[in-house]
Image: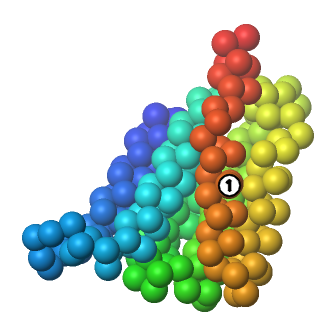
Amino acid sequence: MGRSRLEAFSDGVVAIIITIMVLEMKVPRGETLTALRPLSGVFLSYVLSFMFIGIYWNNHHHLLHTAQVVTAGVLWANLHLLFWLSLVPFVTGWMGENHFAAVPTACYGCVLLMAGIAFTVLRRAIVASQGTNSLLKKAIGRDWKSRTSLALYACAVVLALRAPRIAGLVYVLVAVMWLIPDRRIERALRE
């Protein structure tokens, strides 16, 4: 399978995930702005999840541009990532409908943690397919951002059971950390 086919399939799945998330937001009853108040949790969780899906889509795009070949390992690792991302609409809705209650917020973090692990597995599969002179390996180096994200997700999952709003802030922190552009792969591709 070529890289472009894998990228097109993944893009389609991500588009469906975003569509499902927005369709989960129900139209409010009433014509005033106060009718939106009960939807505040759903809307906030949607914004956070949209940011995460966008971050994964963006980084996935850069990651695949380094892939010279698409092996069976890369295909399965990509499906593993898409599986966890496909659960984001469910946990987003659950967390939003329950106004960031402990268990839904912890489950949301579990899905983010597993998506982060799956992204790491995909990255390693691409590096393994490239051999010892892997462009991707040179570009990412020690990858402190991914390691820090996984550690923060794990802490937030535990924290969510006692202080779900603080766990939510940790999720926002991770998103902001990734919104700051990571130019390592772009630089490596130009060189």
Asked whether, in this view, residue 119 is left or right of residue 20, the answer is right
Q: At numbered mark 1, what does the secondary structure look like: helix, strand or loop?
A: helix
Asked whether, in this view, residue 6 is left or right of residue 151, the answer is left
Q: Residue at x 41, y 46 (%)?
A: 11
Question: From what the image shows, is residue 22 above or below residue 190?
Answer: below
Residue 55 in the image: x percent, y percent? 55, 46
Asked whether, in this view, residue 35 is left or right of residue 96, the answer is left
Residue 18 in the image: x percent, y percent? 37, 57
The answer to whether one can see residue 126 in this image is: yes
| Count of numbered badges drawn on the protein | 1
The answer to whether one can see residue 9 in this image is: no
Q: Residues within 10 Å of mark 1 (few under 14, many from 20)?
A: some
Front in this rendered view, residue 73 or 79: 79
- Amino acid type at circle 1 is Leu
Question: From what the image shows, is residue 151 above or below residue 52?
Answer: below
Where, by quadrant of the figure, is residue 52 drawn? bottom right
Q: Residue at x 10, y 70 (%)?
A: 31
Residue 182 in the image: x percent, y percent? 68, 32
Residue on which the image places disc 1: 173
- Quadrant of the image for the C terminus? top right
